Image: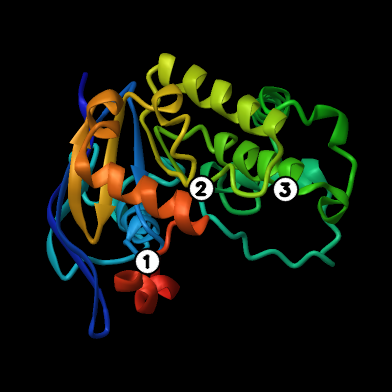
Amino acid sequence: MAIAVRAHELTVRYDRVLALDRVNLTLDEGQALGIVGPNGSGKSTLLKAVAGLIAPVGGSIQVFGGAPRSQPPGTIAYVPQVEAVDWSFPANVYDVVAMGRFPRMRALAPFSKHDREVVDAALAALHIGDLRHRHISQLSGGQQQRAFIARAIAQEPRLLLLDEPTTGVDAATEEALREFVRELVARGMPVLMTTHDLERAAEWFDRLMVVDRRVLAEGDPATVLESGAYAGIREHVHTHGHLRTDATQEHAEHD
């Protein structure tokens, strides 16, 4: 498989705060890579760097052999952990998903037959076609998350970045999202995803990485799940109920 994402010694700072420290990773096409780590460990920062939203201060990041920002519009689909949404804006589910077509369209161009077909397919893939006329604010958290992922898929991207997409969703939605991600990967889509779900990582991902500003462990899920780095995070979760450590508390706002 061709390499979709390659980071070499990737280093990112927020002012004086070191968010990522010499991170190396590769993601092949047709592969799902999961990122786990404490809050404030740089997981979200890593996705933003891959998306081209944050410029590194050291090292390099390449997507399909070039800089993230040099990719054609729509190539990288990024679904952040928290969407900045004006819930009073008069947009229904169809409108939200249709926004995913904008990077692929010429300015002021009307929707084509292909655009409508792609939006309909994205709605169907996330099982929200029956919600197309409902205002986005009227959806449950899980339904909203499906709508945002459908919008990303409507871009027809080559790379999908998901930042903890299962946070706050019910078990049925989580399983539907897992099946959807695995279907995308089976069709050749590379997926990079952060997660707080430590128990089902092997069901989601082909490879798993533990990050706490640096890469602590990386490999196939079975190997990483047996590693000391993962065991330390898992113990903290069982004890405290979340992925925060004292060492990363001060940096949590940057993750």
**What colour scheme does the image use?**
rainbow
Instruction: Evaluate if marks 3 and 2 touch, with contact meaning CB atoms under 8 Å apart.
Output: no
Q: How many marks?
A: 3
Amino acid type of the residue that numbered disc 2 sits on in the rendered structure: Glu
Mark 2 Cα-neighbour bin, 10 Å: few <14, some 14–19, many ≥20? many
Name the outermost residue toward the front: 239
Quarter of the image with the C terminus in it = bottom left
Q: Nearer the viewer, residue 118 or 211?
A: 211
Judging from the image, what secondary structure is the residue with disc 2 in? loop
Q: Position of residue 7 (x, y in %)?
A: 17, 48
Indicate whether 229 appears above or below 239: above
Residue 6 seen in the figure: no
Residue 159 visible, this orientation: yes
Which mark is on residue 96? 3
Going 51% across and 47% down the picture, which residue do you hit? 164
Mark in front: 3 vs 1: 1
Q: Residue at x 60, y 30 (%)?
A: 177
Q: How far from the left and from the top, in percent, is residue 141?
A: 74, 49
Q: Which residue is mark 1?
A: 40
Q: Amino acid at mark 1?
A: Gly
Quadrant of residue 198 within the rendered picture = top left
SS state under label 1: loop
Specify few, some or many for label 1: CA neighbours under 10 Å numbering under 14, 14-19, or 20 or more.
many
The answer to which of marks 3 and 2 sits earlier in the sequence is 3
Apparent side of residue 87 relative to residue 217 in the rendered image (left or right): right
Residue under numbered circle 2: 164
Q: Residue at x 50, y 26 (%)?
A: 181
